[in-house]
Amino acid sequence: MSPCLAVSGLVAGYERGNPIVRGASVTVEPGQIVTLIGPNGAGKSTCVRTIAGLVPIEAGRIELEGQDITAVPAHGRVATGLGFVPQSDNIFADLSIEENLQLGVPRGATRDGRARAEALLASLPEFRDGRARRAGGLSGGQRQVLAVARALMAAPTVLLLDEPTAGLSPRAVTELLRQCRQLADEGLGILMVEQNVRSAFTVSDQVVMLVQGAVAMAGTPAQLIADPRLAAYFLGARSPA
């Protein structure tokens, strides 16, 4: 199966000549959840923000379904099939649920994205009859679900999630990750940054660990769990044996 997202040799940062991401490569196949993990400051969020078009690229290549989108601006990447949900400030609190969803519909969007979003919201009773409800009154978990649903309105083939479970209750974490797994099982490719490693491993197909902006480990969750370097990296070792 060909990857829906292929990132190779990515070098990027907020200041030219001072990269945060240093030669990272990652691929996502349709129906896969690939999770980026790593210690604080490893460049995980910068990596997905770069793929989303929000951080300048110094080197490397980003392909979406075989199309080179490295030089495509952020708004253009949505049209190519790339969705992005940032960690915070990802909904419009003063607007209703319905209005937030409508803002996620780009020109020429297909029904597929709307159907996915509708199915996601319909699975939660509090959204079924509350489309006029102000989004600012939602819980943290509900806000994240709404942010994901809005991204799905554009019918992406790949969805980027930057720490989607940050600040959520254990129950909300479980529910949100379950929804992500269901979306992947329906064919969506997901690249997710996650600090909640234990929970992320339960839904991920592949895991990529970044350390100081570079890929230090990659494999299935079982492979990384069995590797003693996993704990060593999180404990701060730079070159574990």
Image (cartoon, helix red, strand yellow):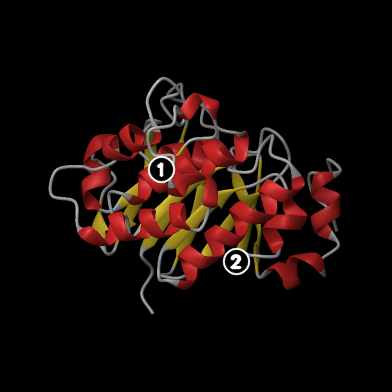
What label sits on residue 17 in the rendered view? none
Q: Position of residue 89 (x, y in %)?
A: 49, 26
Q: Residue at x 46, y 29 (%)?
A: 135
Task: Tell me where residue 49 sits by quadrant.
Answer: top left
Q: How many neighbours does mark 1 have within 10 angstroms: few (below 14), some (14-19), or many (20 or more)?
A: many
- Callout count: 2
Q: Residue reaching furthest bottom?
A: 1
Q: Residue at x 53, y 36 (%)?
A: 143
Q: Please give the residue where the numbered disc 2 appears in the rendered image.
A: 206
Front position among marks 2 and 1: 1
Task: Check the picture and name the quadrant holding the C terminus.
Answer: bottom right
Q: Please give the residue where the numbered disc 1 appears in the rendered image.
A: 84
238 horizontally vs 66: left or right: right
Q: Earlier in the sequence, mark 2 or mark 1?
A: 1
Name the element at disc 2. Answer: strand
215 horizontally vs 40: left or right: left
Task: Check the picture and name the quadrant holding the N terminus.
Answer: bottom left
158 is higher (above) or lower (below) than 22: below
Disc 2 from disc 1: Cα separation: 19 Å
Q: How many neighbours does mark 2 have within 10 angstroms: few (below 14), some (14-19), or many (20 or more)?
A: many
Amino acid type at circle 2 is Gln
Q: Position of residue 28 (x, y in %)?
A: 45, 64
Q: Is residue 51 visible?
A: no
Name the element at disc 1. Answer: strand
Q: Which one is in front, 78 or 151?
A: 151
Q: Residue reaching furthest left?
A: 108
Q: Are marks 2 and 1 in contact (CB under 8 Å)?
A: no
Q: Which one is in front, 234 or 87?
A: 87
